[in-house]
Image (tube, rainbow, N blue to C red):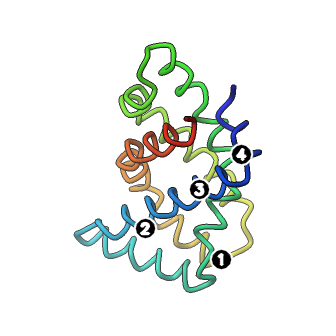
Amino acid sequence: MALRDGLSNANKKDAIISECTKLLDTQVSGMGGVSGLGLKAAYSAVKGIRPTYCNDAIERLLPESLNALDPIWSEGIQTGNPVGHLTQNRDRAANALLAITDARIEKSSNTIVRGAYSKLRKSAKKHVEDAIPGLAKIIDNFTK
């Protein structure tokens, strides 16, 4: 069964979106330094556009994201440890996820979101990689 197949269950879908939104909030709030301040400011600006923007974006991106992570997750199932495998392959997973957001942001007409994304894109890979262990746990819970 593909990871995306579980999204047909509305309760599971809502739960994974909620957990991913919490993970995003936690990752952003835990950032420090100058780059952390910039990211927090951009995150606040995006949430200021619409308070549910991040939650809604996760909902829109979730099917494509699960499709992108599915091959890595499936490899992990074969090894008996999909959470560990996804975590160990966080570079590959981050690239797969960022390819989706890069393509989407290129088509966005929202100049605030595009501007914030372009300023933060260089550091985004590290931040996405840092979130992969938490995301792997969410996916693991979601697939059970």
Q: Which residue is mark 3?
A: 15
Disc 3 or 4, which lies upstream in sequence? 4
What is the three-letter code of the residue carrying label 4?
A: Leu
Residue occupying the point 51% across, 82% down: 45
Disc 1 or 4, which lies upstream in sequence? 4
Q: Position of residue 31 (x, y in %)?
A: 29, 66
Within-10-Å neighbours for mark 3: few <14, some 14–19, many 20+ = some
Residue 47 lies in what quarter of the image? bottom right
Residue occupying the point 39% across, 71% down: 39
Q: Quadrant of the C terminus?
A: top right
Q: Is the residue 95 above or below the residue 120 in the image?
A: above
Q: Nearer the viewer, mark 4 or mark 2?
A: 4
Residue occupying the point 62% across, 59% down: 58
Disc 1 or 2, which lies upstream in sequence? 2
Q: Which residue is mark 2?
A: 25
Residues at marks 1 and 2, CA–CA distance in whole angstroms: 22 Å
Residue 110 lies in what quarter of the image? bottom right
Q: Nearer the viewer, mark 1 or mark 4?
A: 4
